[in-house]
Amino acid sequence: MQGDPTEGALLTAARKGGLGPETLSANSRLDTVPFESEHQYMATLHDAGLGTPRLVYPKGAVEAILARCGAQLDNIGNPIPLRAVEIHDAVEAMAAKGDASAGPGPQGDGP
């Protein structure tokens, strides 16, 4: 495994969610923005294939990530308006149960 314990937990959750190794390794990592406490997030840039926009996978403080988001993806990968209030409510519900939150998922870098 490459990365820290949080990344390991995310990979485990992805596998439990039905994403196999072929899916998880399909988008090769091109670059990394390391975590800095002043920014409260880190991100990785991935190749999504020929003719497909590259993907950015951020992780960190929900507020820091949402501040950089203009949209979110629906359950089939289509961009939809950002529902920040719903995301905050979900994070608060998880925190109340003692679950850790990794914040929003991948973001495209445009066409």
Image (spheres, rainbow, N blue to C red):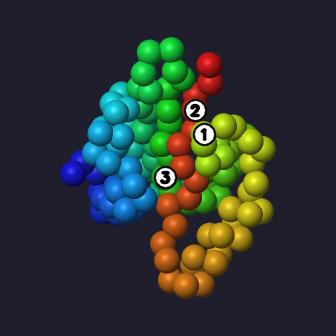
User: Which element is circle 2 on?
Assistant: strand
- Residue bearing mark 2: 108
> In the current view of this chain or complex, which residue is farthest to the left?
1
Query: Which percent across, then down, holds residue 77?
Result: 60, 39
* Image quadrant in which you'd find residue 13: bottom left
Q: Is residue 18 above or below residue 30?
A: below
Relative to 2, is 99 on the left or the right? right
Can the viewer see residue 75 in this picture? yes
Whole-percent x and y of residue 47?
A: 41, 26
Residue underneath mark 3: 59
Residue sticking out furthest to the top: 51
Name the kind of residue labelled 2 in the image: Gly
Question: What amino acid does circle 1 point to?
Answer: Gly
* Foreground pick, 81 / 7: 81
Residue that badge 1 annotates: 77
Separation of residues labelled 3 and 1 (CA atoms): 18 Å
- Res 24 → quadrant: top left
Relative image position of residue 43 (x, y in whole percent): 46, 43
SS category of the residue bearing label 1? loop
Residue found 62% across the figure and 19% down from its top: 111
Task: Work out how far the residue at label 2 is from the one at label 3, CA to CA, in angstroms.
Answer: 14 Å
Question: Which residue lies at the image location 74% right of the left edge and 57% below the top edge?
Answer: 84
The mark nearer the N terminus, 1 or 2, is 1
**Kind of residue at disc 3:** Lys
Element type at mark 3: strand
Which residue corresponds to the image point at 60% horizontal and 42% vertical from the top-left? 76
Q: Residue at x 60, y 59 (%)?
A: 62
For the residues carrying marks 2 and 3, which lies nearer the camera in this image? 2
Mark 3 crowdedness (10 Å alpha carbons): few <14, some 14-19, many ≥20: many
